[in-house]
Image (cartoon, helix red, strand yellow):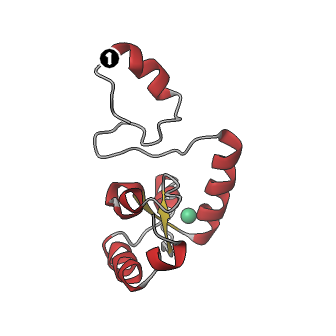
Amino acid sequence: MQNRDKLYGRRWREARASFLTMNPLCRICQAQGKLVAATVVDHILKHDGDTGLFWRVDNWQPLCKVCHDSTKQAEERRGFALGHGLDGRPIDARHPWHRGAQDLDDEGGGM
Ligand SMILES: [Zn+2]
């Protein structure tokens, strides 16, 4: 665990800037057919100071400020994050999809 100030240091600012260069459009607006510049790199899953989660690029999404703020509010009401990993599975273990999937895939042990 590192404290938040350390996580959001120079390395993050550089990683964030290059991520936004590669992913310049807000993902949510784009899904709605709008082209809006992303200004925020959002962590799909709250990292809570977990450096592994913090630096996982498949846990990042480009958002505009408006979407970032409204998404996070909706997520807090809903209790889980939307978003999919590179394998197409919902990234948040609290997502209801995982409840159904556990019956089909009993290898388990993922967490
Ligand atoms: Zn947006």
The relative height of residue 74 versus residue 39 in the rendered view (above or below) is: above
**Residue 22 position in % (x across, y down):** 30, 72
Q: Name the residue tied to disc 1.
A: 106
**Residue 53 position in % (x across, y down):** 40, 56
The relative height of residue 75 versus residue 61 in the rendered view (above or below) is: above
In this view, the residue in front, 98 or 22, is 98
In this view, the residue in front, 22 or 35, is 22
In this view, the residue in front, 11 or 29, is 11
Q: Residue furthest bottom?
A: 10
Q: Quadrant of residue 21?
A: bottom left
**Residue 16 position in % (x across, y down):** 39, 76
Q: Residue at x 38, y 81 (%)?
A: 17
**Residue 25 position in % (x across, y down):** 43, 68
Number of residues whose C-alpha sits closer than 10 Å to that of mark 1, classed few (under 14), some (14–19) or many (20 or more):
few
Three-letter code for the amino acid on which mark 1 is drawn: Asp
Judge left or right: residue 42 versus residue 103: right
Q: Quadrant of the N terminus?
A: bottom left
Q: Quadrant of the C terminus?
A: top left
Label count reads 1
Ligand 1 lies in quarter: bottom right
Asked if the residue at label 1 sits under 8 Å from ligand 1, the reply is no
In this view, the residue in front, 53 or 44, is 53
Q: Residue at x 48, y 67 (%)?
A: 35
The relative height of residue 46 versus residue 36 in the rendered view (above or below) is: above
Q: Residue furthest top?
A: 103
Judge left or right: residue 60 versus residue 64: left
The relative height of residue 51 versus residue 32 in the rendered view (above or below) is: below
Question: Mark 1: which secondary structure?
Answer: loop
